[in-house]
């Protein structure tokens, strides 16, 4: 079911990890950001759009993780975009014939694996780094690229509508999940990304995270602060007094505590290896 969160901006939420697909109305059709996860959900979204007399004229993936790179044939054959780094990473990770089977086995939870159509996974075109907006006929959608959760991760700012689509940051249920593979200083990168977002959210009153609840104006800075506090705790190898970790986690999100433990452990191993903190 589509739900309007701002004028001309609607979301379709998946049962899987409260994943938010975002629909933005343009002049000749809609832009679809992170389309969804399970096949029947994307088919449902395609139906809803058809009933509204809308076609998808462009797609966008906020980052190169499987749950943001999916597509369904019934959504049509519009061009799908991501940042250049996002597209290059997706291409790289999908370049060998066994890649999809590996993703299905290692990353997709077994209980939904059969419901996740991988045939159109990751078929995105990289937008050149100097392109500041998504090329489409609709309200300006500014690409705010940063290095944080995944290579080429982008938030999208729809200024006219007061909306920030945050990708996998600023969630009320997921802690910051750092990209611990591809970068020299994942902690500082993440903090820099939060500063970058802080600098663009002045007029934002609707925050759409990749997973979790939509935030209102009061949530924008609160979630930036919450993520920063968490990353500081991670940096200082401290206990994260974070509502998303431990007994205060929302129902169904108890596993986030193990993500936190895993991050602490990997960062500790990293600093042992490099002899540098963080
Ligand atoms: Zn995600």
Image (cartoon, grey):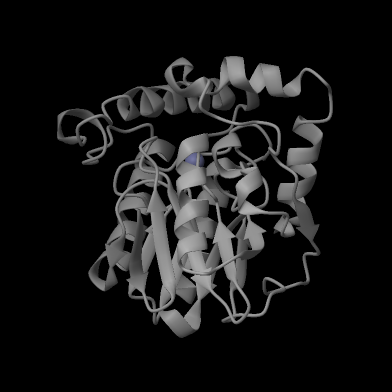
Q: Residue at x 55, y 57 (%)?
A: 33
Vertical side of 217 occupied by 38: above or below: above
In this view of the protein, which residue sits in the foreground, 106 or 34? Answer: 34
Q: Position of residue 109 (x, y in %)?
A: 47, 20
The x and y percentages for residue 88 are 80, 45
Query: Horizontal placement of 207 versus 196: left or right?
Result: left
Q: Residue furthest left?
A: 247
Q: Residue at x 58, y 38 (%)?
A: 179
Residue at 67% x, 71% y is 134
| Above or below, comparing residue 203 to residue 118 in the picture | below
Q: Position of residue 116 (x, y in %)?
A: 55, 29
Residue 278 appears in view:
no
Judge left or right: residue 97 versus residue 58. Answer: right
Q: Is residue 55 left or right of residue 36?
A: right
Where is residue 55 drawn, in percent x and y? 60, 65
Q: Spot the residue most to the bottom.
A: 160
């Amino acid at each position: 079911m589509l739900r309007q969160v701002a004028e001309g901006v609607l979301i379709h939420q998946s049962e899987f990890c409260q994943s938010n697909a975002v629909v933005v109305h343009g002049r000749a059709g809609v832009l679809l950001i992170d389309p969804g996860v399970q096949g029947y959900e994307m088919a449902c979204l395609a139906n809803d759009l058809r009933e509204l007399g809308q076609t998808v004229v462009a797609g966008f993936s906020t980052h190169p993780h499987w749950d943001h790179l999916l597509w369904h044939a019934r959504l049509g054959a519009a061009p799908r975009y991501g940042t250049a780094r996002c597209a290059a990473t997706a291409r790289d990770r999908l370049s060998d014939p066994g890649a999809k089977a590996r993703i299905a086995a290692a990353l997709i939870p077994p209980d939904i694996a059969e419901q996740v159509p991988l045939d159109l996974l990751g078929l995105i075109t990289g937008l050149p780094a100097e392109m500041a907006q998504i090329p489409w006929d609709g309200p300006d959608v500014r690409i705010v690229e940063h290095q944080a959760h995944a290579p080429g991760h982008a938030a999208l700012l729809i200024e006219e509508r007061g909306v920030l689509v945050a990708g996998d940051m600023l969630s009320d249920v997921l802690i910051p999940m750092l990209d611990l593979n591809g970068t020299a200083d994942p902690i500082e990168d993440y903090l820099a990304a939060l500063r970058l977002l802080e600098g663009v959210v002045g007029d934002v009153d609707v925050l759409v995270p990749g997973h979790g609840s939509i935030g209102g104006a009061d949530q924008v800075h609160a979630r930036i602060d919450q993520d920063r506090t968490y990353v500081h705790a991670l940096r200082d190898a401290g206990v994260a007094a974070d509502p998303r970790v431990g007994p205060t986690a929302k129902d169904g999100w108890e596993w986030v505590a193990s993500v936190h433990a895993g991050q602490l452990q990997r960062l500790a191993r990293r600093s042992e290896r490099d002899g540098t903190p963080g």
